Image (cartoon, rainbow, N blue to C red):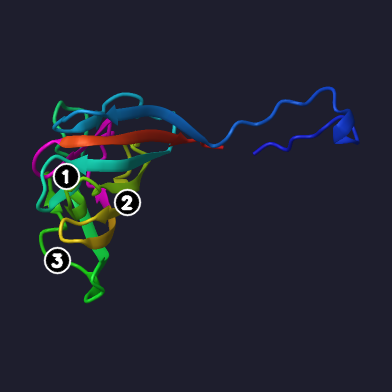
Amino acid sequence: MALVKHNNRSILNVTALDSIASGGLNLITTNTISSGVSSSSFTSNINSTYDTYMFKWINCHPATDGGVHWEVNFRDGSSAFDAVKQTTLFRTIHNESDSETKVDKESGDDLAQGTGYQRLNTGVGGGGDESVSGTMFLFSPSSTTFIKHFMSESMSHEHDNYTNRSFVQGYCDLTAAIDGVDFKFSSGNIDSGVIKMYGLSKS
């Protein structure tokens, strides 16, 4: 960040300011969901402008109750979201009755050279006050030299009254550029929510 200097010794007497540097986090796109959609995609402005992209989902609510998974997939230049991925997921859970709390890992949450959607949070409830919120970083999606790392952290109210904090790390195992990202629930529509895409300035 550039140093901002005032020309006057006293802020009370300032009559002009040098240019003020802009922040490093730049909002690119906001997807606001107010009625049911099967998924929410970002298919433009993922390019070499930024080395790091950040996605935030806020109170994404599933239309289906009973424990659905919040998921992501990536597009690598084709029309399909089917990039090959190597991933790992673990979570911390605690129920409202205070009878169970643990760090948990289950089979089926990870992908081993898989092209399907990766779970970002599991068992999200569809009750009126239940939802999932979180953040995902995608690194150097336009590189044609390296694989594409991503990682996320999210928080949900599970359908069976558990708090669920999930952590996902992995990479798209390809050197082709990633030019699209798609979020959805494993079953049913996204009933409501907000998903934002930001770019982090290179300097």
Quadrant assignment for the C terminus: top right
**What whole-number distance in Å separates the C-alpha atoms at marks 3 and 1?**
21 Å
The earlier-in-sequence mark between 2 and 1 is 1
Q: Disc 2, disc 1: CB below 8 Å?
A: no
Residue name at image x 33 percent, y 41 percent: 58
The earlier-in-sequence mark between 2 and 3 is 3
Q: Disc 2, disc 3: CB below 8 Å?
A: no
Q: Nearer the viewer, residue 56 or 157?
A: 157
The residue that mark 1 highlights is: 84
Whether 176 is drawn above or below 151: the answer is: above
- The amino acid type of the residue labelled 3 equals Glu
Q: Nearer the viewer, residue 96 or 154?
A: 96
**What whole-number distance in Å separates the C-alpha atoms at marks 2 and 1?**
17 Å
Residue name at image x 69 percent, y 29 percent: 20
Query: What x and y, as percent, mark residue 201?
Result: 51, 35
Quadrant assignment for the N terminus: top right
Whether 15 is drawn above or below 110: the answer is: above
- The amino acid type of the residue labelled 1 equals Val
The earlier-in-sequence mark between 3 and 1 is 1
The crowding category of the residue bearing disc 3, from other C-alpha atoms within 10 Å (few below 14, some 14 to 19, many at least 20), is few
* Image quadrant where residue 163 sits: bottom left
> Which range is magenta?
170-189
The crowding category of the residue bearing disc 1, from other C-alpha atoms within 10 Å (few below 14, some 14 to 19, many at least 20), is many
